[in-house]
Image: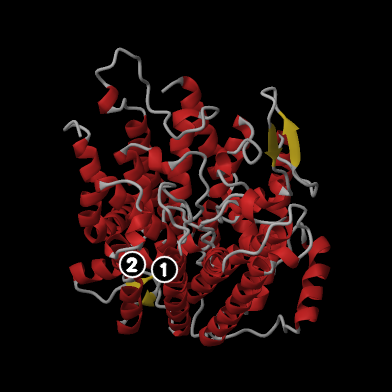
Amino acid sequence: MHSYDFTLILAFFVLVLLPAPFIGRYLYRVMEGEKTWLSPVLQPVERLCYRIAGVDSNREQDWKSYSLALLAFTLISLLTLFSILMLQGSLPLNPQQLPGLEWTLAFNTAVSFVTNTNWQAYSGEAQMSYFSQMVGLGVQNFVSPAVGLAVLVVFCRGIARRSSNSVGNFWVDLTRATLYGLLPFCLVLALLLVWQGVPQTFLAYITAHTIGGTDQVVPLGPAASQIAIKQLGTNGGGFFGVNSAHPFENPTAWSNLFEVASIILIPAALLFTFGHYVKDLRQSRALLVCMLILFSVGLGGTLYAEHQPNPALAALPIEQSGSLEGKESRFGTTASALWAVTTTAASNGSVNAMHDSFSALGGLIPLFNMMLGEVIFGGVGAGLYGMLLFVLIAVFLAGLMIGRTPEYLGKKLEAREVRLLVATLLVMPIGVLVLGALAATLPGPDESITNPGAHGLSQVLYAYTSGTGNNGSAFAGFGANTPYHNLMIGLAMLLGRFGYILPILAIAGSLAAKKRSPVGSNSFPTHGPLFVTLLTLTVVLIGGLTFLPALALGPIAEHLTLFQGF
């Protein structure tokens, strides 16, 4: 590694961590309806939205009503997006006259964007019109992370409120998260990307005459605005088929830095939003330290693996400083490894290199990040409420060890909450191991595996882990666009989204109704080094015990075979 590699990593952490406390407080004020510097401009728009939708912004809901509203909104979004994709050929803003998608691909894509996964079994410039990109996918890029943020806020209220049956109003939370939280940040990043050369146009594709005498179609489109929200909303996906390795999506080193930092900017800020809800920023710092430990270990491991020469080429008389196979040469090994770890620590899924070409250990770490439930910063809202589930599990384990009723911030955890916590622990194993095993063994679906042996198993594990974890990135060697995988990965995405959201809303409603006991000297502290250690071990051990056998047959076995000469 060179000095500019360390400069890149330092700049990344500065861009993420320096503004996080300020953005976190801003988002707290937004979600609780307090005045912000944007209120004079956006409050009239907010009130107009409520008036059009017939929403009483002063009326709160209990967790069941909140859940029903969320599910109804999701169903409407799913049906609307599915219709747009199927009827694309008859809709406007389609200068290339692209036809509608095949129905299983349309279903998979609609589920993908509604669940904040953005798994892509299609190529954007070859199969998506401008209308589908903007009105279909672009709208979901805003509202799907807004739903995640709304669920997190409900969880925060459940912990912070006392003897309350209400947890907020879904329509109000969704509106505020979109209008105040995502739109302003997206506008700033989109302008930065246009400055760096990302196109933002409605012109048709251009045909260029090359010096070789052939014609080449150069795709264009309203890319900058879509790329900005795909990163800030931890959506992922790509306006163009090769994603953030495409020179129009990610043209310069500056655009690469802005985009990779924006992936976890809002998730990092939400840690401080949580601290403001519970009136204890020490809780924010403890969670931040835990996430930074897990992130740094993963980044260090991936950098080490990717900067090592390939053992198969070690005997050749050439100088090797790491593998550039599958990586964009404009960014190099370090920027590719940083992006891979960041995008899988978050539920983002965008890539600036092909993870399928990473070394066995370099591919294992992004895969393991997703298997943990993407709680190392994670998606907008989704990452933190996933980590808070691990917090409750760690508190429960601590209570068992010391023989006391577990409690967190004055709220006792009883049988109902524990049963719901256990239910969430089943989501990733079912989606990854059960559905992945079917994909790997059934005749027909297994033909999508393009590599034999351990790497082929890694491809299947990665695809179904990415779907269940609502990540959306891919190894890229897996043939996912088949009716079977479109439907099964779609099912995995729905399981990974609502298998967490519904238990979380139920836990939030249960906690909100409880009285809050005073936190005293006899309470188990959840902000010190001891708890950070316990929480870190809980996250790693639960993921490790669940998925280690599968990892041993996939990337670990692949790594060991490199030294056997086959």
Disc ID at residue 435 = 2
**Residue at point 23% right, 74% down?**
404
Can you name the residue that lies furthest to the top here?
Answer: 317
Where residue 252 appears, x then y in whole percent? 63, 31
**Residue at point 32% right, 69% down?**
430
Distance from label 2 to label 1 (Cα)?
A: 7 Å
Residue 272 sits above or below residue 352 on the image: below
- Residue matched to label 1: 488
- Viewer-nearest residue: 534 or 141: 141
Q: Which secondary structure lies at badge 2?
A: helix
Disc ID at residue 546 = none
Mark 2 packing: few (<14 Cα in 10 Å), some, or many (20+)?
many
Amino acid type at image mark 1:
Met
- Viewer-nearest residue: 87 or 502: 87
Q: Are marks 2 and 1 in contact (CB under 8 Å)?
A: yes
Residue 189 lies left or right of residue 416; in this view the side is right
Amino acid type at image mark 2:
Leu
Q: Which of the 4 image quadrants contains residue 359?
A: top left
